[in-house]
Image (spheres, coloured by chain):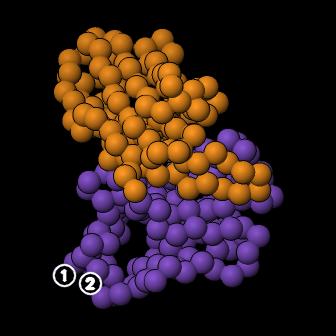
Amino acid sequence: AQTVTQSQPEMSVQEAETVTLSCTYDTSESDYYLFWYKQPPSRQMILVIRQEAYKQQNATENRFSVNFQKAAKSFSLKISDSQLGDAAMYFCALPYGGATNKLIFGTGTLLAVQP
Amino acid sequence: EAGVAQSPRYKIIEKRQSVAFWCNPISGHATLYWYQQILGQGPKLLIQFQNNGVVDDSQLPKDRFSAERLKGVDSTLKIQPAKLEDSAVYLCASSLRRLAGAYNEQFFGPGTRLTVL
């Protein structure tokens, strides 16, 4: 069965600094994607970054990047130059169910950004 | 492009009452999902539709929850009767029909926060 684990319930970072959020997962599929979603207080889930497991290169989207360790089943999110608008819940997510395109989410990490 | 619309944004009811949530997906998105997000947890899939057919409702408590997507566009999720433990945010998401070997991003609505007293 697929599982997603986020072991950091809360994190805090100073504005302009860098923070890393951790995620581990387990899946029986050989080819898969991994995602980080951001959920601000407005509750709208926003896709931050995706990683395709067959790609060795870590994904990068502006200030957001991942450290994908396939053998260790680890998928961490690094936020550089943190901004006040980055404050939110961050969820790691893993698709499952083959063609049905479903998602399983971790329990989330609440990120606070200090001015 | 308009996003996924949901209403109401907030709802407060007493236990044993009924409640319904509405979702309008992004135009052209064949797949629609309802998730339940209990405070402090990640979203959990309740039901998935492909057009107007159910793909997966294995985690839907069918004794009290029901959902429909009659014309393959809008969807409603109903709870009857509500219990205290149903207090949660109910998120709707939609995506294009999945193509083989690809993943279609799910786009989420703003959710409905339900409080059961």
Instruction: List x then y, in percent, for residue B97.
Output: 64, 45
Identify which residue is drawn at 19% across, 27% down: B12
What residue is disc 2 on? A15
Q: Residue at x 57, y 27 (%)?
A: B52
- Callout 1: SS: loop
Q: Residue at x 68, y 68 (%)?
A: A52
The chain letter of the purple chain reads A
**A46, B59: nearer the viewer:** A46
Q: Which residue is mark 1?
A: A115
Q: Chain of mark 2?
A: A
Write down the colour of chain B: orange
Would you place residue B17 above or below residue B49 in this image? above
Residue extending furthest right? A30
Q: In this picture, is B12 found above or below B65?
A: below
Q: Nearer the viewer, residue A2 or A10?
A: A2
- In the rendered structure, the answer to whether residue A113 lies left or right of residue A11 reads left
What secondary structure is marked by label 2?
A: loop
